[in-house]
Amino acid sequence: MGDKITLIGSVLGYDENRYTFPICPALVYLKVKVKKKVFDIFSERDMKSLKEEHPEIYQIIEEHSYAFKPELVENLEAKFTLKDVPVGQWDYIIAAYVDTRSYDITEKFGNNGFDENKEISSEQLNSTPLIENIIIPVKDVWYKEQLAKPKTDDPKRTMFIPGETL
């Protein structure tokens, strides 16, 4: 096993072809990708498979369970920081649960910190102690509720005229 890394990013909403607002609350966590198979830390079945197929990686995750503890993101900027994440010969996919669905950096508008919407490779993880600007994209179905309502006043009367009495 190599060193440890810190991963910093945000959970951002998107609609059509643009980002909308930070999304919170969200539960941010890591998925492990070994060769071409992804293991979801929240899935008992996946963890059992990881233990059977790659016991050495499973052991590292068990030993560093504090680094794999999901982070509840409740701040208005929807920022997260995952610290002391162990680095080895596997990749990571950063994901977030919002409502009842999981989203991750490999989806449209995702960013792994290297301007790609794919997993963070072991080579990238081993090249630096800090990866920033990670974006977990979430399809924003709430943003229209946040937009300002159109003005409904008389459009002809929008301003007080000096000298006029009310």
Image (cartoon, rainbow, N blue to C red):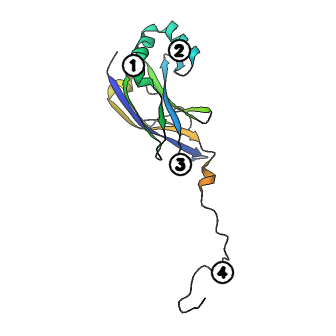
Tag 3: amino acid:
Phe
Q: In the image, which is nearer the foreground, mark 1 or mark 3?
A: 1
C-alpha span from label 2 to label 1: 14 Å
- Give the mark nearer the N terminus: 2 vs 3: 3
The type of residue carrying mark 1 is: His
Give how far apart the Cα atoms at labels 1 and 4 are.
Answer: 66 Å
Of label 2 and label 1, which has the lower sequence position? 2
Between the C-alphas of marks 4 and 2, the distance is 65 Å
User: Which element is circle 4 on?
Assistant: loop
Residue at 57% across / 16% down in the picture? 44
Q: State if disc 3 and disc 1 touch (CB < 8 Å).
A: no
Q: Is tag 4's residue or tag 3's residue first in the polypeptide sequence?
A: 3
Q: Please report whichever mark, 1 or 4, sits nearer to the chain's N-terminal start.
A: 1
* 3D distance between C-alphas at marks 1 and 3: 33 Å
Q: Is mark 1 on a helix, strand or loop?
A: loop
Q: Position of residue 97 (x, y in %)?
A: 56, 33
Q: Name the residue under label 1.
A: 64
The residue indicated by pointer 4 is 156
Q: Label 3: which residue?
A: 21
Q: Which comes before the other along the chain, label 4 or label 2? A: 2
Q: How far apart are marks 2 and 3 (CA)?
A: 33 Å
Q: In this view, does 164 lie above or below 79?
A: below
Q: Can residue 118 be seen in this view?
A: no
